[in-house]
Image: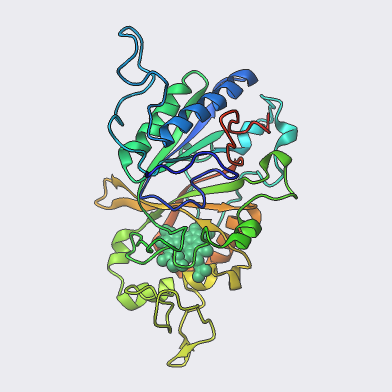
Amino acid sequence: TDAVPFHGEHQAGIVTPAQDRLHFVALDVTTDDREDLVQLLQDWTEAARRMTAGRDAGPVGAVDGSQYAPPDDTGEAIGLPASGLTVTVGFGPTLFTTADGTDRFGLAARRPAPLVELPGFPGDQIDPAISGGDLCIQACANDPQVAVHAVRNLIRIGAGVVSVRWSQLGFGRTSSTSTGQATPRNLFGFKDGTDNLKAENGSALDRFVWVGDGDADWLRGGSYLVTRRIRMLIEPWDSSSLDEQQRTIGRTKGSGAPLGQQAEFDPVDFTEQVDGRFAVPETSHVFLAHPTNSGTAILRRGYSFVDGSDGLGRLDAGLFFIAFQQDPETGFVQVQRNLRLDAMNEYIRHTSSAVFACPPGVRDDGDWWGRALF
Ligand code: HEM
């Protein structure tokens, strides 16, 4: 009952309701054999089709196969339901052309023009070791064990063809992607996702999220995925006043209402003044990120993370930011440029960055991820 349909026009895990847990992995392809890559994508599709339905990764299963061979499922999800698992796959710029310009798979001419490495932004502290990747897998579920099981088995199936470049666990979705979902809170304690693009905004999704006619044919119905691991400087934030926190975000911490308004979903009013100054400060995050001022919209689907502590007595915590958009340049890049003077920048550091083109959905049992590309 809690299985999310795997087949469809679009991949699940984009506008389907955001689950509670994330396991995201970026991989590099270690072969230059095109047939091996195609076989991998077919095998991944088959395994994901099974796991999202709550079944083992392979047809034999974790315990019913030969005593003398590794099982075709690793076993830790035995007895667990589908838990809303979605598996979303994306292709990085380096799948099409490596950094030194090599066209390993004969795909260079098929690279969609918008699929280029993201530019640098002021204040970036990007670590290349946890950035980029030829391929990505976003596994989301309401049970962390189910998300981890999915990623682990796909990595196992990819042995000899791909190797893990970096990965990230996330908890506590920091967005809602459906009007039926309550808005969760991020690690700053604020509701996050109030003014997100939602599944119900059909025409806005066609305009801002799904790739349409103007881009590569094989990507129509797909979307671009941007990830940014954003460290949140929890300790300075926690010692700032409530007023400073609210003026940094531009919303109240309690209800999530825009400053100067009453309720969470009241429209933001940038002309409203209180005591002779704008209720929503021009340097606040909401002011600068809002479509009125950024000129665009993105679908956010991020997760919180706490990767232990940093050895200096501080939590290594933050937001693993995920955004889907029709074009990275007119989506994330445009918003992020507009956040240059964001008051929140004092409290955050971007530490990893990646961009991927997510192909359209797998249509039926004969279809597989990226079929139209190859
Ligand atoms: C809104 C937090 C990073 C884009 C918000 C809101 C919060 C928030 C609390 C208000 C509630 C809502 O409407 O969802 C954070 C935190 C971040 C972060 C803690 C980093 C740790 C980013 C980044 C971008 C971004 C990197 C894009 C470049 C947006 C957008 C909105 C928003 C587009 C909606 C604005 C509106 O339409 O009113 N964010 N955010 N955020 N954020 Fe962020």
Seen as rendered, the residue at the extreme bottom is 276
Q: Position of residue 229 (x, y in %)?
A: 44, 49
Closest to the observer, 94 or 217: 217
Q: Position of residue 57 (x, y in %)?
A: 41, 26
Name the residue rendered at 58%, 36% in the picture. 362
Please state the horizontal and vertical placement of residue 185, each as a whole percent of the image: 35, 62
Q: Residue at x 65, y 52 (%)?
A: 327
Please tell me how many numbered marks the rendered image carries. Answer: 0
Q: Nearer the viewer, residue 324 or 18?
A: 18
Q: Quadrant of residue 139?
A: top left
Q: Nearer the viewer, residue 355 or 80?
A: 80
Question: Which residue occupies the extreme left position in the image?
Answer: 313
Residue 350 can be seen in this image: yes
- Whether residue 171 is situated above or below residue 175 in the rendered picture: above
Q: Quadrant of the C terminus?
A: top right
Residue located 45% across and 84% down the image: 279
The answer, for residue 97, to whether it is visible in the render is: no
In percent of width and height, residue 126 lies at 49, 47
- Choose top left, top right, bottom left or bottom right for residue 11: top right
Q: Which quarter of the figure is the N terminus placed in?
A: top left
